[in-house]
Amino acid sequence: MSSAPAASDSGRARLRAIIEEKSLMRGNFTLASGRPSNFLFDMKKTMLDPKGINLLADAILEKTAGIDASAIGGLAMGAVPIVIATILKSQDTRRPLKGFWVRKEQKDHGTKASADGYIESGARVIVVEDVTTTGESVLKAVAEAKGRGCEIAAVVTILDRLEGARERLAAEGIDLLAVFTKQDFGL
């Protein structure tokens, strides 16, 4: 068993190229934060591409290799593909991870759960997000995990737009680890 896959410089370069080709859009957009932007990272095309999701999982496992955690999760829908790919690839490491995700709205049927999976009291967890801007969305997942008695080991984002998320999470005592920032794409 290995500790985590080594995301080589060539793997990182391939992932960056896939994100630029499939997920970076230019134009006039309104972000989830309500802010206007002349670029948008729609990570779904990268996450739903077999090479893209494979490289994303490698990058997440590399970023979190030194972090003591038992589970990884985030806010549905953006975190779901990342969580699934990462837990699948983690099975061959020294630190297999279990997964969870937090719903934007509580189910109105069945268990009426607001989260699914391994979000258990006393667990150290990693929260993932596809793109961070202000940190508002990822803080919803953080609040749910904390409310269930979890300790947040770190937040990992595929892309940090560098618009306040790092500072906002730091104010909560949480480290934000970014695979890429907008600067990696010349923005």
Image (cartoon, rainbow, N blue to C red):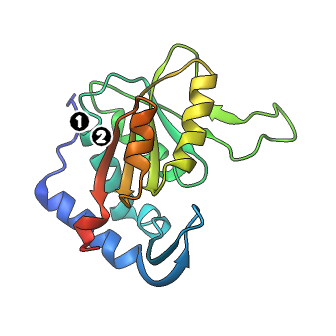
Q: Element type at marker 1?
A: loop
Question: In the visual, does 121 lie left or right of 106?
Answer: left
> At x 59% / y 63%, what residue is drawn?
32
**Residue displayed at 57% across by 49% down:** 137
Residue 134 higher or lower than 121, as above or below: below
- Give how far across and how far down residue 161 sits, in percent: 38, 61
Q: Is residue 12 above or below residue 91?
A: below
Whether residue 118 appears in this view of the structure is no
Using the image, tell me which numbered label, if any, was put on residue 61: 2
Amino acid found under the numbered disc labelled 2: Leu
Say if residue 151 shows up in the picture. yes
Q: Secondary structure at mark 2?
A: helix
Residue 124's disc is none
Look at label 1 and name its amino acid. Ala
Q: In the shown orientation, is residue 8 left or right of residue 28?
A: left
> Where's residue 22, x and y in %?
39, 76
Q: Residues within 10 Å of mark 2 (few under 14, many from 20)?
A: many
| Relative depth, front residue between 93 and 16 | 16
Residue at the spot 49% in from the left edge and 18% down from the top edge: 123
Residue at the disc numbered 1: 4
